[in-house]
Image: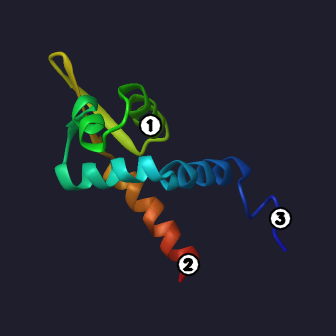
Amino acid sequence: MLTSQKINLKKLKIAANSMKVVSHPMRFAIIQLLEAEGQLTVTEIYEKLKIDQAAASNHLNMMKSYGILESRRFGKFTFYTIKEQALDKIIECIEKLTS
């Protein structure tokens, strides 16, 4: 039986939301694209995935807010990259749950 002493509800919600964020088909496609390319601007992402700029920005901001992506500004461009440590933790959790 699970008790509140064994499970931190706040951490459980963060983990569940992180998995939900990366499991969305378009966000998963963005992650795959960034894994292949390394870093891309929002323009490069929405052009390569053939989606609206607003949709790409929304997905990127959501993943950034959950610590899955990071961004850096260079002039007028913002480059997005995967935060490897965060994605590794999500993958590790999935592997533990499904093995």
Q: Dot 2 lies on which element? A: helix
Label 1: few (<14), some (14–19) or many (≥20) C-alpha neighbours in 10 Å: some
**Position above or below: 78 against 25:** above
Q: Which residue is mark 3?
A: 3
On the image, the x and y values in percent for residue 31 come to 34, 51
Q: On the rendered structure, is 6 left or right of 76?
A: right
Name the disc covering residue 59, or none: 1
Q: On the rendered structure, is 67 left or right of 38?
A: right
How far apart, in angstroms, are the residues tagged by discs 3 and 2? 23 Å
Give the mark, 1 or 2, whose residue is nearer the N terminus.
1
Q: Which residue is mark 2?
A: 98
Q: Are marks 1 and 2 in contact (CB under 8 Å)?
A: no
Q: Dot 3 lies on which element? A: loop
On the image, the x and y values in percent for residue 32 come to 31, 55
Residue type, mark 1 in image: His
Task: Return the residue nearer the eye: 54 or 63.
Answer: 54
Task: Return the residue nearer the eye: 11 or 43.
Answer: 43
Give the mark, 3 or 1, whose residue is nearer the N terminus.
3
Label 2: few (<14), some (14–19) or many (≥20) C-alpha neighbours in 10 Å: few
Q: Residue, x 41% and y 25% (percent of image)?
A: 54
